Image (tube, rainbow, N blue to C red):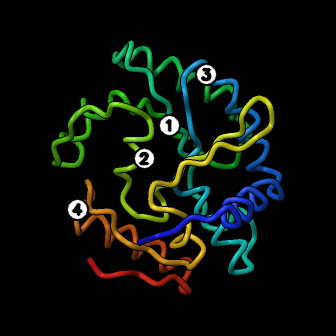
Amino acid sequence: MMIETQEMRDRLTNIFERNEWLLSLFGRAESLSPHPYYIGAGCLVQTVWNELTGRPPMYGVSDIDIVYFDDADLGYEAENGVVERGKRLFAELPFPVDIKNQARVHLWYPERFGVGLAPYPSLEAAIDSWPTTASSLGARKEAHGSWRIYAPFGLEDLFRLTVRPNKTLVTESAYYAKADKWKSKWPELAVIPW
């Protein structure tokens, strides 16, 4: 069983607070409301791994994932409107920002990845299915300054530099492709076999 303690959550948010570009990202992302959202997965995980391994804060970060949930309008045009707003909002960031409405993932996921997917009932349910236990992580800074962290598998694997499959949705080959890519950048990672 994976654990998440208040100490781990505090350690995580402390790393975020000390990272200038990431903190700026959280501040700007708040304006994507009214939909619930999280900055998620890779850029957060990689920021922590960089801190733990003494690498520069942006090392290995290739993009930023921002997910939101709007099941009132599943049309491409509605999602594209949010994406276009995001392009303007995050234009000067050194990484592309990938914004996705998790309420409509089931419409394109099977064709793109060859795996059927039922509609997600919530934003958190989407994060529950992300490919590894460490990267099943979403965070946002609330308007009043507190952090909202969603980590369904806890934070232990993240802080132990462990890549473990979350077999909810990812295929074995996709898991190993992701794990191998990460291991090439952070050789300290322990990759748990499928």
Of the residues under marks 1 and 2, which one precedes in the sequence? Answer: 1
The residue type indicated by label 4 comes to Thr
Neighbours of disc 4 within 10 Å: few (<14), some (14-19), many (20+):
some
Whether residues under marks 3 and 2 lie with C-beta atoms below 8 angstroms apart, the answer is: no
The residue type indicated by label 3 comes to Arg
**Comparing labels 1 and 2, the label whose residue is closer to the camera:** 2
Q: Which residue is mark 3?
A: 85
- Measuring 69% from the left and 77% from the top, which residue is drawn there? 52
Whether residues under marks 1 and 4 lie with C-beta atoms below 8 angstroms apart, the answer is: no
**Comparing labels 3 and 2, the label whose residue is closer to the camera:** 2
Q: Quadrant of residue 11?
A: bottom right
Gap in angstroms between the C-alphas marked 4 and 3: 33 Å
Q: Quadrant of residue 147?
A: top right
The residue type indicated by label 2 comes to Ile
Neighbours of disc 3 within 10 Å: few (<14), some (14-19), many (20+):
some
Gap in angstroms between the C-alphas marked 2 and 4: 16 Å
Whether residues under marks 4 and 3 lie with C-beta atoms below 8 angstroms apart, the answer is: no
Q: Which residue is mark 4?
A: 171
Q: Indicate the position of residue 133 as horizontal and vertical percent values.
A: 43, 64
- Residue 67 is labelled as 1
- Measuring 38% from the left and 53% from the top, which residue is drawn there? 130
Q: Which residue is mark 2?
A: 127
Whether residues under marks 1 and 2 lie with C-beta atoms below 8 angstroms apart, the answer is: yes
What element does badge 3 sit on?
helix
Whether residues under marks 1 and 3 lie with C-beta atoms below 8 angstroms apart, the answer is: no
